[in-house]
Amino acid sequence: MRYSKSILKSIFLSGIIFWLVIFSEDFNADMLFWVFLSIIPISLCCSFTIFTTIAPWFILNSGMKPREVYVKYFAYYAILCFALCFYGVWKSNFSIYAISFFASAFITTMQTWNWLVIDNPKDSKS
């Protein structure tokens, strides 16, 4: 599978969501420095999350087509991911930074599943 393309898209998507949520609450021109610096931890988090929570579903089920893996496991992954993200936001007393982090994590992981299935050359459209 082509993980590198999906990881790059995920880093971009996650960074945009993370900072849009924060800027919707509080925008300060001094924060632009942190936007560029945040690319490092965002890329580490995205790469780690994709390789530890999404890729194993496809690797362990290598005999199945990626679309079949998606249909079989995505719903369970989405429910668990939503529950964990909501719990994190709730435990943080709905802090804007926690909302930003968990919202970007949830949306990015859900979209990454789609990218991994759509961008896969081994999967036929059946």
Image (tube, helix red, strand yellow):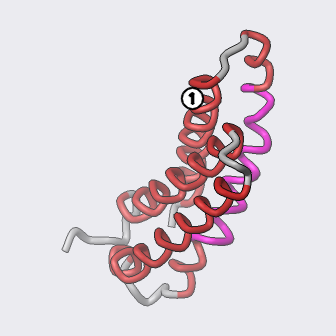
Residue type pointed to by label 1: Leu
Q: Is residue 7 above or below residue 30?
A: below
From the image, give the main secondary structure of the stretch colored magenta: helix
Residue 63: image quadrant is bottom left
Q: Residues within 10 Å of mark 1 (few under 14, many from 20)?
A: some
Which residue bears the numbered disc 1?
A: 20
Query: On the rendered structure, is 100 left or right of 30?
Result: left
Where does the magenta region start and end? 35-54
Residue 86 at x, y = what percent? 58, 59
Residue 66 at x, y = what percent? 39, 75
Does the segment drawn in magenta span residue 49? yes
Residue drawn at x 37%, y 83% is 72
Figure label count? 1
Residue drawn at x 49%, y 57% is 112
Q: Is residue 83 above or below residue 16?
A: below
For mark 1, give the secondary structure. helix
Query: On the rendered structure, is 57 left or right of 38?
Result: left
Residue drawn at x 55%, y 37% is 17
